[in-house]
Amino acid sequence: MRRRAGLILAAAAAALFGPLFVLRRLGPLDFWWWMSLNVVLLIGLGAILDRRYLPALRADLRTRIGRKVALGVVSAVALYGVFWVGNEGARSLLPFAGSGIESVYGFKTGASLIRVVLLMVFLIGPGEELFWRAFLQRRAMERFGAVPGFLAVAALYALVHAATGNAMLVLAAAVCGLFWGAIYLRTRSVLLVAVSHTLWDLAVFILFPLR
């Protein structure tokens, strides 16, 4: 079971996130609560199935914390810049880009702004990196090799969004998966990518939306 933990949780991620992005609601849970619970569940299962998971996270927090946080901030700004340029170009060149981008911002409809921000900062932003990079990519790189493992997880990260049929969302997920995956490949620091992901989420969804 533990040897197959990566494959098991990769399948679980596809099963959990695919319907989430399509349905956006599960009974009383809106997208943000559902997303948060999925992330917590996957991290918890990862900790149970992989005894090296939590020690690796603790080790990351013991060295160069300030440098990792600073690089996380810089990388978040850089990624936002990539998306700003991409947004301008896509809206000019692709007829469907505008509606696709607006659909992504529709995830916020009906949700309390304060709740969305708190869930982004304390669960969704760092939690996604704790699962996708610190658990899944780490194991994929160990099993398949550094670059193939990184590319496989980046592809899965994009594919879980494909069920929406929103090409712009899939493209955005592909860019993010490659960006954060490459940083993790280079640094092996989940703290760095967690800071980057969380700040980018806040910038693109809350502070400076690309609309």
Image: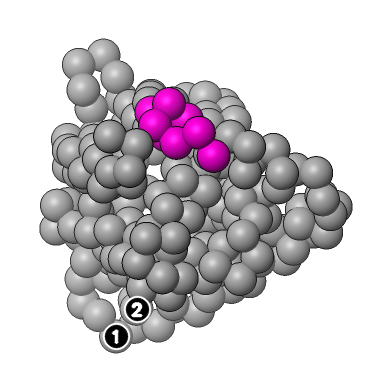
Q: Coloured how? A: one colour
Q: Does residue 86 appear left or right of residue 99 in this picture?
A: right
Residue 90 has which mark? Answer: 2
Image quarter where the N terminus lies is: top left
> The residue tagged with tag 2: helix, strand or loop?
helix
Of residue 7 and residue 38, the one placed in the foreground of this image is 7
Give me the residue at 74% from left, 63% from top: 71
Instruction: Give amino acid for label 2.
Output: Ala
Position of 162 compared to 173: left or right? left
Q: Is residue 46 magenta?
A: yes
The percent position of residue 101, horizontal first and vertical second, equals 32, 60
SS label for mark 1? helix
Residue located 23% across and 59% down the image = 159
Please tell me which residue is depicted at 33% across the width and 56% down the height of the picture: 157
Magenta segment main secondary structure: helix
Q: Is residue 115 left or right of residue 132?
A: right
Q: What's under tag 1, amino acid-wise?
A: Leu
Q: Position of residue 76 (x, y in %)?
A: 63, 61
Find the magenta span and give its range: 45-52
Nearest the viewer among 3 and 27 is 3
Q: Circle 2: is it few (<14), some (14-19), or many (20+) Cα within 10 Å?
A: some
Q: How many marks?
A: 2
- Label 1 close to label 2 by CB (< 8 Å): yes
Q: Quadrant of residue 165?
A: bottom left
User: Where does the image place residue 39, in percent across and percent down from the top left?
Assistant: 41, 33
Question: Which residue does the numbered mark 1 point to in the structure image?
Answer: 93
> Does residue 172 belong to the magenta stretch?
no
